[in-house]
Image (cartoon, rainbow, N blue to C red):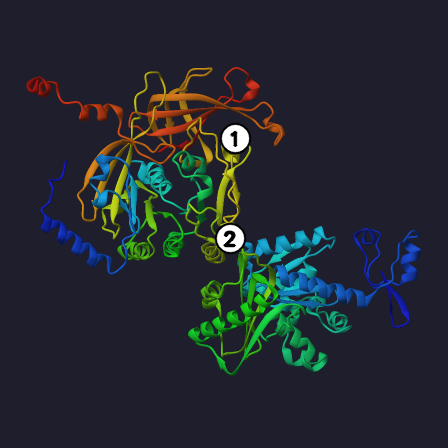
Amino acid sequence: MIGRSGRKRLVLAADAAAQALRLFPGMAATQARALCAELVVHDADPDGDTEALDRLALWALKLYAPIVAADPPAGLVIDASGAAHLFGGEEALLADMVARLAGAGFAARAAMAGTWGAAHALARFINAPATIVPSDQSGRAIAHLPTWALRLPDGMADALGKMGIDTVGEIEAKPRAPLALRFGSELTRRLDQAYGRTAEPIEPVEAPELIQVRQMFAEPIGAPETLARYTLKLVDALCAALEAKGLGARTLDLRFHRVDNRIEVVRVGLAKPVRDIKRLTRLLCDKLETVDPGFGVETMVLAAPMAEPLTWKPVATDLTEAPTPDVSDLVDTLANRLGPGRLYRATPAQSDVPERSVRRIEPTAAPTGETWPAHWPRPARLLLRPERIETLALLPDQPPTAFTWRGVRRRVKRADGPERIFGEWWRRDGEVDAVRDYFQLEDDAGERFWVFRRGDGEQAATGDLTWFLHGLFG
Amino acid sequence: MPIAPSPRAFDALRAAIEKIEAGGRAPTGFLPFGLEVLDHHLPHGGLALGALHEVAGGGNGAIDGTAAALFAAGIAARTRGQVLWCVTRKDLFAPSLAQAGLAADRVIYVEADDEKTVLACFEEGLRHGGLGAVVGEVARLSMTASRRLQLAAEGSGTMGIAVRRWRRQAEAADFGQPTAATTRWRVTALPSSPLPAAGVGRPRWFIELIRCKAGECADFELEACDETGRLALPADLADRSLAAPPWQSRAAG
């Protein structure tokens, strides 16, 4: 990418292949062409870049967090507080974001830290796809980064380098007054922002077509019950706006603009589009306790970044049957409280291997009507990993007469089996010959166990004839 | 143990007490086991729907909770609507619930990090009112917690089943502490029903009814849940109790 800076033509950006040829941003265009004859050069398009970055910010707003802003020239800043739970944690959120961006052809690096400044520095100067630093350790994490990481004006980092200051930690350790005298207030301001000593509010992007309602207060409010009351009012207004468009909300953002210029956020996700005032209010009010109103809230904004057409379905299709009650509101309440993946339904998977025979699906998915084959009993508890047992058994297909599990020896009174399960070579190469022979054993006391032997007892390739306990029957 | 027919005054008094206890709420119904031997020990001939019931395992079942979970699954299978099953440990094997009559499509599992969350989800499920039953696997169940659950169940008419499952055998003594549950059960695995050939027959359980509100304690030896969630009377015991002893029939003849 070649652009014009003043009267010089410079390399502004270079992809991985170009960087391997030692072409770096900041180099003169003529020098780059001299180094590599077949260089493919595109003219820079700063306006197009800004537009694309704004589009990307809107995409992130829809998907990830309620407060997103473009951080030109090539960054996004996202305030993920109050939204990471919808992805199952901060690591999961960053991993998902980097993976999706990679899928769209962007090489992205993400970092999460206590302040905008620290996260900005970590994302650009730590060579890892995703970095997470706890809020209280942000300062320590950026201390060893070079001074360029601080978003300083042009030339200031070089000037610091001439004074022998190379890292952020070194600036932090110096007395502030001489530094401020020499470099102006900009340096200390950036330093304070990175270390979280001064607030740096993010001005969030707003999509023009975004459905949102706003409530301003003459006097700042802060009492929990007042917040809850206005939440109800906002949901009421939002539902009216949604109804006018025939939509239902899939995600809701409630932003609290505090008097000290900070924004507190609550985001809730829904399994299906919803326009029920009571239900949405309940979900938002469940999260209100995570909001810190500080000295007061002067504006509340409720938005529905993801809204989908709401279609009504007839409740009862059969006159003789009572309608099945809808539990999707309970699912939403619990999913917003516990995080995703914690609520699920089990359904049969096409596999005979017990560990793979259960597949998790969304709790609100349509009934599959499938069930597991019932000709062999299955244990009530399946151990997470099979446990080795010592046994006494005849080969090739006799059940054990006694076994020792967790230090207790049990005599087998009755047994059933073997149920032979073959390895699934189409899933894993190592399972081509593998065989497991499952037995149901009952001891003197009447406790029933599910054990298996690796191998069929005749061919060595099928397994090493060790025994494992895999489950407990009731 | 047949109960003698009570005088009319007793019945009237019982009805009056029930009315006071219900506190103006409509009665929510009862779920019979379909086994006379079990049902006639329970008031109204079944498990109350809007109530909390508690099941623990005996012996090693206190730790693995297998029989207790299947007993709960059998009860939940015979309710109508979806079932919320809250756990902290991830070793519940879904196919076994299907074999105890609880179809895979009916169960929504909730995996919580700690018992406090399990109890919160349990209560939330009970309060919702649209579920058939809510099952929660917990170790500690204090009087306060069980009272909350019982009240939530009474309010919505959803059945709550607390499966007690402890980490260590020593902690199982906790089951001696009173709770507000309407019935409390202990289920212990027994040697399975004998088969004519070698093999493991239908599992049997020793089921103790430890506490029953407005009823008496009892214990039973029954065959485990079949694929419709029903318990059964073992064939050998059924024959013995039905057939009159030989000396009696001779005297009668």
Q: Secondary structure at mark 1?
A: loop
Q: Is residue A436 above or below residue A105?
A: above
Q: In which quadrant is the N terminus of chain A drawn? A: bottom right
Residue A459 circle label: none
The residue carrying pointer 1 sits among few (fewer than 14), some (14 to 19) or many (20 or more) residues within 10 Å by Cα, namely: some
The residue labelled by disc 1 is A353
Residue A39 shown left or right of residue A341 in the figure: right
Residue type at tag 2: Pro
From the top left corner, tell me how far across and down residue B251 is, in percent: 6, 19
Classify residue A264 by image quadrant. Answer: bottom right
Mark sitting earlier along the chain (2/1): 2
Amino acid at the residue labelled 1: Val
Residue A239, by quadrant, is: bottom right
**At 84% from the left edge and 52% from the top edge, which residue is drawn?**
A21
* Marks 2, 1: nearer the viewer: 2
Q: Which residue is mark 2?
A: A314
State left or right for residue B240 relative to residue A418. Answer: left
x then y, percent, for residue A115: 60, 68
Q: Is residue A142 above or below residue A319?
A: below
Residue B141: image x %, image y %? 30, 51
Chain under callout 2: A
Horizontal side, residue A269 vs residue B226: left or right: right
In this view of the protein, can residue A143 be seen by the observer? no
Element at label 2: loop
Q: Using the numbered discs, state the Cα–Cα distance from disc 2 to disc 1 in whole angstroms.
A: 40 Å
Q: Residue furthest left?
A: B251
Q: Residue at x 29, y 42 (%)?
A: B56
Looking at the image, is A152 positioned above or below residue B23? below
Dot 2 and dot 1 residues touching (CB under 8 Å): no
